Image (cartoon, rainbow, N blue to C red):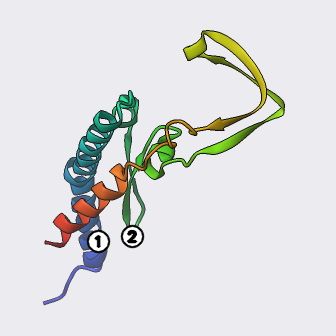
Amino acid sequence: MNLDSSFEDDLRAAILDDVEQQFRDEIGPELIDVARSNWEAYASRNDYDISHIWEDADLVIERDDSSVSVRIEWPELTALFEFGVSPHTIEGNPLLHFYWDEIDQWVTTESVEWGSETGGIPESRAIRDAMNELRRVLQA
């Protein structure tokens, strides 16, 4: 029995088709869903209005002749919540000028000790924990 000369190429394409479909229909959406659940719990614990993070996440599937990759593109500044931010000094160049809601006025200053009262932004680990959960499911 002889195999058609395109057998390997056809098999590779079929496998990549299946992987791409699983990424698009199952794995990618599951990753976004688990991360969303993590984000919602984090936002609730910290009284943050950050629903744009999970609402604006985009699933991106890329494929070439030999591989398929999936990634989630999260909105700008998502990493601040994922990894947290320690209190720190923000220096003006030469001054900072911003509106301060609590005192209902514009402020001009040389620097600000950001997060000194709140302790900064705690890390959420929403994405990393979602990836670890997905990894456990895929390995089972």
Lower sequence index among marks 1 and 2: 1
Q: What residue type is labelled 2?
A: Ser
Q: Identify the disc placed on residue 60.
A: none
**Which residue sits at x=23%, y=48%?**
34
Judged from the image, the secondary structure of the residue bearing numbered disc 1 is helix
Label 1 crowd (10 A; few <14 / some 14-19 / many >=20): some
Label 2 crowd (10 A; few <14 / some 14-19 / many >=20): few
**Which residue sits at x=48%, y=49%?**
84
User: Are the residues at dot 1 and dot 2 in contact (C-beta closer than 8 Å)?
Assistant: yes
Q: Position of residue 27 (x, y in %)?
A: 23, 54
Residue with the mark numbered 1 = 12
**Which residue sits at x=23%, y=79%?**
4
Question: Is residue 140 shown above or below 101?
Answer: below
Residue extending farthest to the front is: 117
Measured in 3D between alpha carbons, the distance from the residue under mark 1 to the one under mark 2, in whole angstroms, is 7 Å
Q: Identify the disc placed on residue 66.
A: 2
Who is closer to the viewer here, 5 or 122? 122
Q: Quadrant of residue 129?
A: bottom left
- In the rendered structure, the answer to whether residue 138 lies left or right of residue 53 reads left
Question: Is residue 47 shown above or below 83?
Answer: above
Question: Is residue 2 shown above or below 35?
Answer: below
Judged from the image, the secondary structure of the residue bearing numbered disc 2 is loop
- In the rendered structure, the answer to whether residue 139 lies left or right of residue 83 reads left
